[in-house]
Amino acid sequence: MTTKKHLMTVHKHDFAAERAATSFALSSSVEQSPAKEELVRAYRTMFTARTMDEKAMILLKQGKIHFHIGGPGHEACQVAAALALRPGHDWAYPYYRDLAFALHYGSTPYEIFLESMHRLGGPSSNGRQMPAHYGDKALRMPAQSSPTGTQFLQAVGTAMGAVKEGTDEIVYVSSGEGATSEGEFSEALNWACRGRYPVVFLIQNNGYAISVPVKDQIAGGSIAELVSGYPNLLRFHVDGTDFLSSYKALREAVVHTRSGLGPSLIEADVVRLFPHSSSDDARKYLVAEELERNRLRDPLPKMEQWLLEEGILPEAELDELKSDVRREVNEAAERAEAQPSPAAETAERNVYSPNIVVPHETEFHPAREGKNIVMVDAINHALHEEMGANPKMLVYGEDVAGNKGGVFTATKGLTAAFGESRAFNSQLAEASILGTAIGLAIRGFKPVVEIQFGDYIWPSFMQFKDELVQLRYRSDGNFSCPVVVRVAVGGYIRGGLYHSQSIEGFFAHMPGLWIAMPSNAADAKGLLKTACREENPVLFCEHKGLYRQGFASTPEPDEHYLLPFGKAKVKTEGTDITVVAWGMMVQRSLEAAKKLERKGVKVEVIDLRTISPWDRETVLTSVKKTGKVLVVHEDTRTGGFGGEIAAVVAEECFRWLDGPVMRVAAKDAPIPFAPALEAAILPQESDITAALEKLAAF
Ligand SMILES: Cc1ncc(C[n+]2csc(CCOP(=O)(O)OP(=O)(O)O)c2C)c(N)n1
């Protein structure tokens, strides 16, 4: 074998020169020192945070709180960040160690103790989230979750929204150095740098992610160095235990980012003076000398010393401040403890929005006479109409923009009609699509995004499960993100293992999410228009085998036609057996029903239309009439949504049943490419007919 010479010229990037030009050195153009009273206020917050962390450990021992994750050692850079921002104008996505940030940004010790003690009235979660997950609507601080790293893309989405609205708001997002190893961090930086979006990333490097040292986490040991190749990114690497250095960097970053020049990243070297959390014992992985070294870098005595030396805070005033803060913290804890915890009856509140925007089907008027429309065009028209009606609606995803209009043309013409700011391409990253959409929706946009294939939705799974469907719940209704995710699903198109999957069963397992799966053009249009108006997040499954299918084409409903979620359609009435189906399986079931009809068996076929919520009433009423039921779905049998329907029918209709509750579904296998193999795995009309014959015989 001959060794090929490298044919590519590697472009050498002069990192050293670029670094000198764009970062690390602080410019003198920005006012760099806060006023004296600001310095005292900053110290007061740092001391308050520390006192609260210590108090939390006492409350923990007393059994009054059950978990604590504190920020001792991180206070200086956090307060510096809050001081540099404009609370209530800017947006903040703090992380669990950001107690000092939250306090200086406007949260009070009382409010934070309410959350630590899961009491009513906390501004973040009303007793739903664990302690140290900050949030407050008035402060534009979305109630935080626990996954390390999901906050980055949401922050980028919120920043995109600021640019779209032409404001000078910026978005603060923070994490430890460990969280930067999550892929979403790189996706967020890429997106923020591509669009010069106003995000300030504060990475607080305390040397450890629980027990994992930086050397096992970050190539080269510094995240500010590692990201040096990103264009438009202003970077700083500072001593985060030093308030003034931190403030100078944060202030310059904020001024730069607010002026529209692009995002900034500050790596603040800090120390973690407590174990990772109250469940951790740092002595298992930190030697005594290191603990001592960390103690010597404690930001609090450093700041205190400096304030004394500079004569900014004389000793007597310092002592008074400290006793004041201690009293304030103790009182706040006592007041919080006296508040009630949420009642059990409220446990299911705000899983879904209580407000149903489209409760009934509107009258069907055809858009034009005598012509059918295929499903993909009906979807396209729904998007056009809804974007026209709602200036806050955005459409984006992979390949959706311009003349291409998506790989299935569902978004054709949207960029031409509504401009690049409202219909645009995303980067090829599904978590990015979801994460940014959440950040946009939080600030009032209506993102209707596209995931190209259900088979590739999985990188966005954590944004779905832990964020999209839980924000309303975890903030007890204070925040929501009613994003619509359109996704092409399903098989029978010779798409092989990775262009054929059915996904609704996985997503049906997510309380908080609505799921649609229409079987024809008119339903697709009516349901998608509803999805664009509703307040719950929606997964809109579009069967790509139906996009241009003749039997799924229908007269096009006009722009006023809306179909509610949770209302099934009885496609053919019958008295002997009920079939429950959705998506591609509706047509197959109707064909099978015709065959049975010829044999004198009257089959009632129900098109479920939406999986979540699903129309129990129509299904149960039908089964009580027929006494027999067959659930048909394209997804694999085990764990498919049919199991859920079967279980409910068994529970609710036991007395009416004259035969076993049966299912037809795909075999428990991937979907192969070769025609004979594909046909052997996916359910066929003959399988449905056979199952109906079996049921009829009971
Ligand atoms: C996605 C995800 N994986 C794992 C965890 C468990 N976890 C919580 S905090 C943490 C370490 C984070 O370290 P770092 O980002 O450096 O922040 P630090 O806690 O050191 O301030 C881990 C692994 C999580 N919350 N989310």
Image (spheres, rainbow, N blue to C red):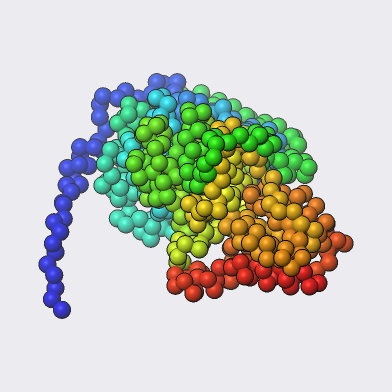
- The C terminus lies in quadrant: bottom right
Name the outermost residue toward the bottom.
1
Q: Which of 681 and 593 is in front in this view?
A: 593
Q: Which of 246 and 292 is in front in this view?
A: 246
Picture layout, residue 623 above or below residue 554:
below
Name the outermost residue toward the right.
655
- Residue 318 in picture, x, y percent from top left: 50, 27
Residue ID at (54%, 73%): 680
Left or right of 602? Residue 537 is: left
Residue ID at (47%, 35%): 384
Left or right of 268? Residue 530 is: right
- The N terminus lies in quadrant: bottom left
Q: Nearer the viewer, residue 406 or 17?
A: 406
Residue ID at (28%, 38%): 232
- Residue 84 in picture, x, y percent from top left: 41, 28
Q: Which of 95 and 600 is in front in this view?
A: 600
Picture layout, residue 324 above or below residue 225:
above
Residue ID at (13%, 56%): 9
- Residue 221 sits in quarter: bottom left
- Residue 554 in picture, x, y percent from top left: 56, 45
Note whether residue 373 is visible. Answer: yes
- Residue 5 in picture, x, y percent from top left: 12, 67
- Residue 269 sits in quarter: top left
Note whether residue 251 is visible. Answer: no
